[in-house]
Image: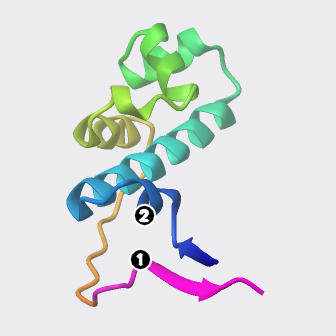
Amino acid sequence: MKIEEYESVWDAIEDDPAERERLKMRSMLLTALRRKVEGWKVTQSVAAKRLGITQPRLNDLLKGRFNKFSLGALFDLATRAGLKVKLSIDETAKKTKSSRRAA
């Protein structure tokens, strides 16, 4: 029996490398935003105003519905939240999955 190991869930479910990286970035941005907003200890209404979005839109963000946000929208929200977003480019190709035999 072969067991496949993946570096991330996105490596396991998305075959297209470009889309896989977009999903990873959107997921990271959404997680950072959710932590930041929750750290404010304010109502969703106040947090939404700080970010310049509606409360239902903030609710989507806090519930992890990142498919409702483009990478650009998440970047903008992160900036409005006071987060500094940096892009790192690694030119070395990583192997995204490996196989090993089950014991």
Q: Secondary structure at mark 2?
A: helix
- The reply, left or right, for residue 103 in relation to residue 86 is right
**Residue 69, labelled with which disc?**
none
Residue at image coords 66%, 32%: 38
Amino acid carrying mark 2 in the image: Asp
- Give yes or no for contact between labels 1 and 2 (Cβ–Cβ under 8 Å): yes
- The residue furthest right is 103
Residue at image coords 29%, 66%: 87
Q: Quadrant of residue 54?
A: top left
Instruction: Please give the range of residues in magenta.
Output: 93-103
Q: Position of residue 66 (x, y in %)?
A: 42, 34
Task: Determine crowd level at label 2: few under 14, some 14-19, many 20+ residues with C-alpha closer than 10 A.
Answer: some
Residue wearing tag 1 = 96
Residue wearing tag 2 = 11
Q: Quadrant of residue 10?
A: bottom left
Is the C terminus in the top left, top right, bottom left or bottom right quadrant? bottom right
